[in-house]
Image: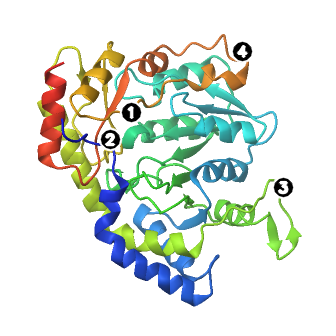
Amino acid sequence: MTSTIPVNSLSRHIAPLQDALSDIAAAIIASGYYVLGPNVKAFEQAFAGYCGAAHCISVANGTDALELSLRALGVTEGDQVAVVANAAMYGTSAVLACNATPVFIDTNVDDGLMSIQSLQAALDSGAAPKAVIVTHLYGKLADIEAIVTLCHGRGITVLEDCAQSHGATRNGKRAGSFGDIASFSFYPTKNLGALGDGGAIVTNDAQLAETTTRLRQYGWSAKYTNSLRGGRNSRLDELQAAMLLHMLPLLDGWNTRRREIANRYAAGIRNPRIVVSGPAGDDHVGHLYVVRSSARDALREHLQAEGVQTEVHYPVCDHRQPCHAGAFDGVRLPNTEADAVSVLTLPCFPELTDAEADQVIAACNRF
């Protein structure tokens, strides 16, 4: 092979935008206004409108968005938060940062999303979470409507983790508009990615919006007056906001291309040793395209030899992370644990060509 097909390529993604983004950077530098200025306000308004939410509060990164959302929901020491265990501890880390306790919920057998049956069983067996974090993994919406109905019927709030699902749509509603509050990441590899770190919180609840606005800047109610505990310096800067504002109108087109690639894989990979993900509709924005194989390591070696780069998302379940030192040894999540040893990520990004996707398909079929 003369070259390797990358699992993602930020250089190819940004190249068509380089001149425009350079002009934006020059304008921001010349403006002398770098934090919480007009570009942040403009992006927050535009992104709230895009998500179908009343409010958007931009923050420094997606992890802060998760934690500050939990704090706004009143999660504190002694509380429980239900969360999946298959997304590199992002949600779990936010729970622990609030001194709360994670209640791990198993996933569906075929898509890695929170199982409503497992959530129902946890609630029926005595778990009493104050909130549930619903992660829309790999770009696909979870069974969010049913989860919201179940949780709200028991007085439990719902935080959507939309870090991988910007623009996913179901029944006319977009990711981030189903629950009580939602978090987004704008890490460069996301469907809408900045040229650095960034994040946002969206909500239709004015009180939650006000609380998160205070929490992102030290808990201030007025300058130098700290009225809320748990605040920090977590602000999206003007440069990233302006660049994200420029890229936002391109997001739906990028998502369409990701879906095309995902559906090309789903239709073309025909190998009994590889389980493909199902077709991608509007509720799946193809952030990652994963397959499952009981011979994952061998498949990965084969694809590398064929010139196809892959990645493993995510090999260590949250409840098995070494930092917990055995605290969750009694937790059993069979579907989550099965995915940890079988899921493999194939190349999927908007600039991937049809010819490259076909090479990936052919390599998989030769395994």
Graded by Cα atoms within 10 Å as few (under 14), some (14 to 19) or many (20 or more), the crowding at tag 3 reads few
Which three-letter amino acid code belongs to the residue tagged 4? Gly
Q: Residue at x 31, y 22 (%)?
A: 301
Tell me the amino acid under the disc marked 3.
Arg
Give whichever of discs 4 and 3 has the lower sequence position.
Answer: 3
Asked if residue 22 lies left or right of residue 207, the reply is left
Label 1, on which residue? 311
**To which residue does mark 2 refer?**
7
Viewed as shown, does residue 167 lie left or right of 133? left
Q: Quadrant of the C terminus?
A: top left
Report the residue marked by disc 4: 326
In terms of secondary structure, where does tag 2 sit? Answer: loop
* Image location of residue 122, percent across then percent down: 59, 21
Q: Nearer the viewer, residue 354 or 56?
A: 354
Q: Nearer the viewer, residue 281 or 146?
A: 281
Q: Residues within 10 Å of mark 1 (few under 14, many from 20)?
A: some
Secondary element under disc 4, as helix, strand or loop, is: loop
* Label 4 Cα crowd, 10 Å radius (few <14 / some 14-19 / many 20+): few
Element carrying mark 3: loop
Give the residue type that dot 1 points to. Answer: Glu
Report which residue position mark 3 lands on. Answer: 229
- Residue at the (57%, 41%) spot, across then down: 152
* Circle on res. 67: none
Instruction: Name the residue rendered at 52%, 48% in the picture.
Output: 179
As drawn, 58 above or below 170: below
Which of discs 4 and 3 lies nearer the camera? The answer is: 4
Check disc 1 and report its element: helix, strand or loop: loop
**Between 133 and 299, which is closer to the camera in this rendering?**
299
Please provide percent x and percent y for residue 156.
63, 39
Q: CA distance from mark 4 to mark 2?
A: 34 Å
